[in-house]
Image (tube, rainbow, N blue to C red):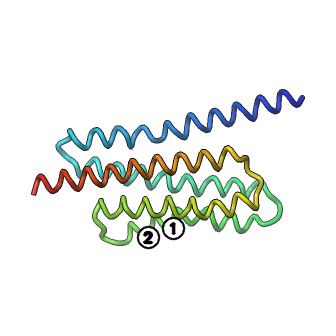
Amino acid sequence: MKNITTKQYKTNEFTAKILGFSGLIPFIIALITLNFHESKIQVLEIIVVYGYTITAFLGGIYWGVGLNIKIGAKKYFFISTMPSISVLISLLFPLSLISKIIYLICVLNLFLYLEFSFLQTFKLPKWFLFLRIKLNLFLTLLLIMIVLSATYQFNLLN
């Protein structure tokens, strides 16, 4: 029985890693496309929408955690709404697309910082935290490269 449980646990970990890193592919494609596509604003808009979607998805993880525990669920329900609220806040202000991407970088990294304390109080697997750190690091680097590339491209156009 233990072998079946361990095998299922490893399968879940592998699936989460594959899907997590696959979620970075659109950002890589966007970075490449940004240098060749004529409508750079459209590419940046897609990046912002996709990034905001990922941010909302991170909140969904903690909504699920709240559903699966008996004590302290309210805290996780509250935490799960924070990414969506932060996205909504940025949509309320007339920010440039570059500013929205920088804001997205800040929100993603702030939420990862907050997750360290959440994961210490709730027994989530260690691989999940390591996966979140790796994905957040790669996504942050990709978004910084996108911002730098877009800024450079816009300076060439002007």
Above or below, 72 against 28 in this view is below
* Residue at the spot 83% in from the left edge and 27% down from the top edge: 4
Element carrying mark 2: helix
Relative to 110, 116 lies left or right: right
* Residue at the spot 49% in from the left edge and 36% down from the top edge: 22
Number of numbered discs visible in the structure rendering: 2
Query: Which amino acid, mark 2?
Result: Ile
Element carrying mark 1: helix
Image x and y of residue 100, in percent: 35, 62
Q: Which mark is residue 125?
A: none
Relative to 148, 142 lies left or right: right
Q: CA distance from mark 2 to mark 1?
A: 6 Å
The outermost residue toward the right is: 1
Q: Which mark is residue 85?
A: 1
Above or below, 4 against 151 in this view is above
Q: Are marks 2 and 1 in contact (CB under 8 Å)?
A: yes
| Quadrant where the image shows the N terminus | top right
Relative to 146, 89 lies left or right: right
| Quadrant where the image shows the C terminus | bottom left
Above or below, 28 against 85 in this view is above
Label 1 crowd (10 A; few <14 / some 14-19 / many >=20) = few
* Residue at the spot 34% in from the left edge and 38% down from the top edge: 29
Q: Which mark is residue 89?
A: 2
Give residue 101's quadrant in the image.
Answer: bottom left
* Residue at the spot 31% in from the left edge and 43% down from the top edge: 31
Image x and y of residue 78, in percent: 65, 68
Relative to 99, 129 lies left or right: right
Image x and y of residue 95, in percent: 31, 68
Label 2 crowd (10 A; few <14 / some 14-19 / many >=20) = few
Query: Which amino acid, mark 1?
Result: Ile
